Image (cartoon, rainbow, N blue to C red):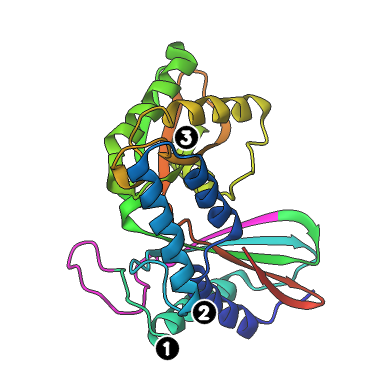
Amino acid sequence: MHIDLQAVEDAAKELYIRALKLLPPDIQSGLARLRDAETGATAKQVLGTMVANIAVAEQTDNLLCQDTGVPIYNVLIGRGVQVDGLALKQALRRGCERATREYPLRSSVVHPLTRRNEHSSCGIGVPVIHIDFDDTPQRLQIEMVPKGSGSENNSFLKMAIPAEGIDAIKTFVVDCVLAAGGKTCPPTIVGVGLGGTSDLAVALAKRAATRPLGTHCADADGAALEAQLGAAVNQLGIGPQGLGGDATAFAVHVELAATHITMNPIAVNMQCHSARRASASFTPAGVSYGY
């Protein structure tokens, strides 16, 4: 299957806009679930306001949040897909620029030293583009995640000592959630990356934080840790927007990789309650959109 690069550009534009305007159903259901289970009166009211805000944004065709974030495109290329990799990345960038200028969107991307804003949501190394491969035949999938600064500013890395064991992992994650407090606009998805190297652990944490609710770590031990950490985090009392309550996090997600015998990297990355994402699948039947 040959990929039409103009279709990729158009999809990159559409995905950015969709991600900013349409909250995935799993997140909407998660907010409703937390609201219904919340025991604190103030927290229940805050969660109800969040649910109402989402409904108003979608009914009026407005953005869910003013922060358009740093644009991230995750590309998964299946078997039998023919595409020029460099041209693919260029098409994604053009689509990102078009969404910002034609829609228009506020550009949140600036040069790290001069703070100059090109008003395109693009810059050096941005949009962030990850390309990977899977064994799905005749399919190319693009996922778009706009990562806001409120959650991204609360990112953490620890090069733990292996002898400290699982207790060090649990303590570090809980301490990170406490340090973030209400700055991440909770309830959050707490992403935990374990193993690999320092850079891989951080990438795994981001992947975990942006995973759909209801999914679990493919590793059985990792999945068990998710449940334990999820229960621990929601006993902290931080609550929605840091105002107290039961609902500090939708869930804790864990992704892991093998690592060196003398180290144990632990990274934490969080996603705010407006956990935005959108996806497009290219198959011989055409392009379909989802979450």
User: What is the number of the mark on residue 197?
Assistant: 3
Which badge, 3 or 1, comes first in the chain's sequence? 1
Q: Position of residue 157 (x, y in %)?
A: 36, 35
Give the extent of the magenta segment: 110-133
SS for callout 2: helix
Residue 241 visible from this viewpoint? yes
Which label sits in the foreground, 3 or 1?
A: 1
Amino acid under disc 1:
Glu
Q: In the image, residue 97 lies at what x, y percent? A: 42, 80
Q: CA distance from mark 2 to mark 1?
A: 9 Å
The residue shown at (48%, 36%) is: 192
Q: How many marks?
A: 3
Residue 232 to residue 7: above or below = above
9 vs 99, nearest the viewer:
99
Vertical position of residue 254 compared to residue 96: above or below = above
Q: Quadrant of residue 237?
A: top left
Contact check, label 2 and label 1, Cβ < 8 Å: yes
Q: Is label 3 or label 2 in front?
A: 2
Q: Residue 291 location, x and y as percent?
A: 61, 63
Query: Which residue in the protein does label 1 denote?
Result: 102
**Label 3 close to label 1 by CB (< 8 Å):** no
The question of residue 62 being in magenta is answered with: no
| Three-letter amino acid code at the position of disc 2 | Lys
Residue density around tag 1, few if under 14, some if 14–19, many if 20 or more, within 10 Å: few
Q: Could you say which is closer to the camera, residue 177 or residue 166? A: 177
**In the image, what residue type sits under mark 3?**
Thr
Q: Which residue is mark 2?
A: 13
